[in-house]
Amino acid sequence: MNCPVCKKEVLIALEYESVEVDYCPACRGVWLDSGEIELLFGDADAAIEFLTIGKPAAVPHGEKHRRCPECNKKMTKESTESEHPVTFDHCPRCDGMWLDAGELAVILKHADALVGSNTVADYLREIFPETTDEN
């Protein structure tokens, strides 16, 4: 599977327990298949509520719609409504989601606040830290 941002960079699959995360070493983005975000939250209802409480987001100026690495369909931009909103790409066909560098860590922080920590989230937080102004 190729990165939807870098286009030709092949995504690396990382698997821990029942969650497989596809990672781009070039742009540090992350692809989550349908249902994987619910596993990271440890509570499917909380994950769905967090992700769907938001609204469609505009594609930033100069950026084209990204294509799903699974089915090549155009993804939509969506944004959560929270203290630290996350804008992500969502595939309406596969129901997977693309997170740019650092966005997975922000989502995991929200998961901790809503349902508490879990071992999968703790492991991924170590691998995919939040980005800072220095990154």
Image: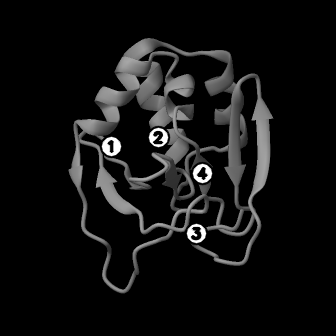
Q: Amino acid at mark 3?
A: Pro
Mark 4 or mark 3: whose residue is earlier in sequence: 3
Mark 3 or mark 1: whose residue is earlier in sequence: 3
Helix, strand or loop for disc 3: loop
Q: Residues within 10 Å of mark 2 (few under 14, many from 20)?
A: some
- Name the residue rendered at 47%, 21% in the picture: 112
Mark 1 or mark 2: whose residue is earlier in sequence: 1
Residue on which the image places disc 2: 106
Mark 1 or 4: the one toward you: 4
Helix, strand or loop for disc 4: strand
Q: How is the image coloured?
A: one colour
Q: Are marks 1 and 2 in contact (CB under 8 Å)?
A: yes
Mark 3 or mark 2: whose residue is earlier in sequence: 3
Tag shown at residue 31: 4
Mark 1 or mark 4: whose residue is earlier in sequence: 4
Mark 3 or 2: the one toward you: 3
Q: Amino acid at mark 1?
A: His
Residue 54, relative to residue 57: is it above or below? above
Tag shown at residue 66: none
Q: Are marks 4 and 3 in contact (CB under 8 Å)?
A: yes
- The residues bearing labels 1 and 4 have C-alpha atoms spaced at a distance of 20 Å
Q: Amino acid at mark 4?
A: Trp
Residue on which the image places disc 3: 4
- Name the residue rendered at 36%, 20% in the picture: 46
